[in-house]
Image: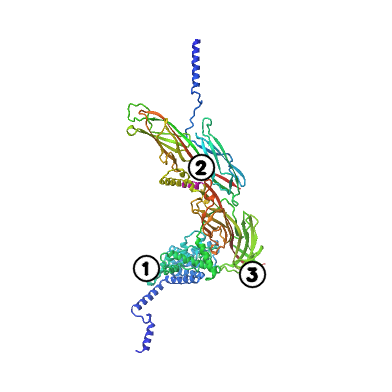
Amino acid sequence: MIKANKIIGIVLLSLFLLGCGSGGGTKQIDYNFKQGTSGLQVSFMDNAPPKKIYENSNFNVILKMENKAAYDLVNGQITLSGINPQYFVFEKKTETFSILEGRNLYLPDGGVSYIEFPAKSEKLFLNAESYQGKYFLNIDFDSTMEFVDTICINPNLYSVYDAGCQIEDRKSYSGQGAPLAVVEVEEIIHPETVGGQVEFRFLLRNRGQGEVEYIELTKAMLGSSEFDECKFKEGYFDSKKVLLTKQNQEALLVCKTHLKEQGSYTTTVLLDFNYHYEMQEVHNLMLYE
Amino acid sequence: MGKAAAIGGALKSAGSKVTPGLTGAGAGATAVATQSAAKSFRNKGFPLFLAAVIIFIISQVLGLSDFYGYASVLFMVYCAYAVFEGRGAYIVTIFCVWYFLLGRASLESVLYYVVPIALIGSIIHGLLGKFKSKDTFAHGFTEEILYGLGAILIFFLDIGLVEMVSQGVVNLPYILTEILRLIPLWGYVGLFVMIQDEEKGEKSFFITVAKWLGIAYLVSIIIFASSIASGAEGEELLPGIEQFIEAKETAQGKFAKTENPAYSNLKCVVQGRFNDLPVCIKDRQDDSKRKVACEAEGFPEGTTSFNECTAELKELDNKNINVVGFNDKTIKEPITAELIPKEAKKYDLLHEKGQAIKIPIDLEIKNPRLDPFEVYVSCNITTQRRKTSIGEAEIVGFENKGENNEKGSKWKHFTIYKTESSIPLICQPTKLDYELNEETRIFNGSYNVVFYVEFKGVNTTSRLERSFFNDLKIYDEINKIKDLTSEQEQELRGKARKDFEEEMKEFLNLKYSSIESRHSTGPEDFARIDFSFGPSEGEPIIETSDSISFEADVDNLGNGKITNINSYNFIGFNGVTFSGSGCSLSGSLNVPQKFMKSSGIPIHLCWVDNLPEEMANPALGDETVEFRAELEYDYLIEREVGITAGVIDDKSK
């Protein structure tokens, strides 16, 4: 009896230890931040600027910037434009930041930065009672985005006996943790008879409130090898860079490579992008006598 | 037969209706013409047509508008009695008695007289018609109303109602006012009657010719109508005939002697200017108006000063500036001034013989910005009908400035120190054209007192906001891409340009969302200086590659006159250079008479050569600049009040 209890106790303890010990030294919580389409969130601090600014007074415009994307923002510039200097004089109208960290395990809410613009109000026009000064808050920065997915390659389209993975002709995605997102991937297999090639068509789209100025492809891997060819449909020269317009915030990347194996297999596709992003908001400064 | 007998025979035949010496076809044509004229004369419309046309021509050539006005009364009566065959005659008769003899003075008189006039006249006509068994009462009643009021309406239209209406109430098409100003309306009524009667009887060559001439004249007036402002004033419910005529003259801008457009048409045709006939006629009309205006200023034709005057007016006309501006809604308290009579309508003033008459009025001034302008006041007393001065008058108290107004009365002067002032002004006659004594009935009747207030050195400022963008920077990113073909580069540049334009459109809609924000704004004082700066008026975004124009004018916002522009000054244009000469950023302007009441005294129309660096190449994407325009001017307001003066009888004491 005592022997049986000992055995049960050892088994239970082993189970406990096994449960705790799995993962080989990795973090206890694994959370994929690279999902969704969150980006930079900007807000004003309370009373900065004040709702009512009086003539000949000092005030501040203080921005709180939170990076909710999963990637760092770099080379950032914040500019206040459209300000009428007859009524509001700013010591400086531009500020920069070199890096604002993205969300990660150590910084799950993303990096936060405060930018301050000190200013002074002047007199109203003649005996006017108020003045509404509309101005623009312009923010632009560089950032990156990474797309990773496991896909199936099956060159034998007509094989009945290959019970390998199933190709998904078209897959949709809800974002990779940045305002620029790969939203759709189309996989086209060209059988041996026509060259034995696989072609991927990646549709990128701006899902944020701002604008993507350009996208640059910096890395394109299928498994452990680079794609034979990758170019943006509307790109120029080396076609690894595309300029987007206001009206068209989408880009199509076409990547092709030769198939090395005869049978079906799953592998990883990895794309890295750089992009330049611009945001603009309009706000008011209200001057009173 | 001897020579004598032959001469005697010729003389004898001269007594006949046939022209002596004419035989055969010539004699027949003359007979037809004479018979035609005789037939026409029997037509009731003919005397009206002939008289109206002749009197119209005489009044136009000699400038006797008054004469035409009174003749129009006779035409109205003739029309009611003869042309309309008595229909409307009672209403017209009673109307003449009320209008001319009883003075059609007040609103009460409308209720007491006009309505009863119409009713009584119609009832009389209806009853008489019924008793004579010619007609039913209702038919007679209706006819009297329609024909009577119709004749009265034609009378008012003929002497200037349309000009008054267009000035005070609604905006009538100027072509309508011009047609009615330049055609003898009664003449056309007569012509219409003649044509109608001719259709019932035999054709008349004379009527046919008159008809076609009438149509040709009407068409030529319609084609060459020109816009003229009217400026009639009147205190009474229905202005007197003189006031209608004055309105007509005022509507002509005191250009009663300007060339008739039909004559201008004829001259241009004779000159062979068929290809640009309307331009030729407009030029002749404008030259004629400038000529009359300069003569009115006291410059006789042919003198150097006359030539300078017409050249200056021509230059002002050619500028053709009309800049849009708006009142600044954030300035709730502008500078205002108003002359407020003590009595709503007329003053009834009783005085003892030898006692001075005093006519009061209140001058209410609001000067919230404490602008240090000066106030000059004077007054004048005139007869009610003819508006002729009965002597000299002055405002009691205040400092005598030593100058007289255009009517000869002294200007008094004071300065305003408060934001709100209510100043009582008293007008007193100082010297009359005839003695004030107990035998002479002076100031025992109806007169008009005109108060003049001139504000000298009034200041106002307007502002205009503009945003400058360097549109050439949009190609910076494209320039970084290497080895583009020219087609690719062109395509990219096209896309970038389109993108930029979208961005500008968004910027415009967000920053300059209201129409006022795209134009200059200023306080709603007596006058406002409006100016524009940019690729087009109302376009607040200026790109580096744009052609930029600069325009300015002064708007009269009140009912008075801008008598002088002492100075204007534009601020914020440091570093901006203009093409050509004559575009200075400061100056002054003598305001010609015809522009004093108008909206749109032109100041500038220039093109920009170069912008300073901060506007041409803004450091941070865009540069927002507020330009300002300062104006100092003089402004005159007038107010007329009616007085009924009476002398207190000694026995009543």
Amino acid found under the numbered disc labelled 1 = Glu
The earlier-in-sequence mark between 3 and 1 is 1
Amino acid found under the numbered disc labelled 3 = Lys
Q: Which mark is residue B62?
A: none
Report the front residue among B311 and A142.
Answer: A142
Residue segment shown in magenta: B501-510
Which residue position holds label 1?
B199
Q: Which mark is residue A280?
A: 2
Report the front residue among B94 and A64.
Answer: A64
Which x, y percent locates residue A144? 48, 36
In reply to whether residue B506 is colored magenta, the answer given is yes
Amino acid found under the numbered disc labelled 2 = Gln
Residue at coordinates 38% horizontally, 80% vertically from top-left? B17
Q: How far apart are the two marked residues, 2 and 3, measured between alpha carbons?
A: 75 Å
Report the front residue among B363 and B220.
Answer: B220
Which numbered disc, 2 or 3, marks the residue closer to the eye?
A: 2
Residue A243, above or below A258: below
Report the front residue among B243 and B559.
Answer: B559
Q: Which mark is residue B431?
A: 3
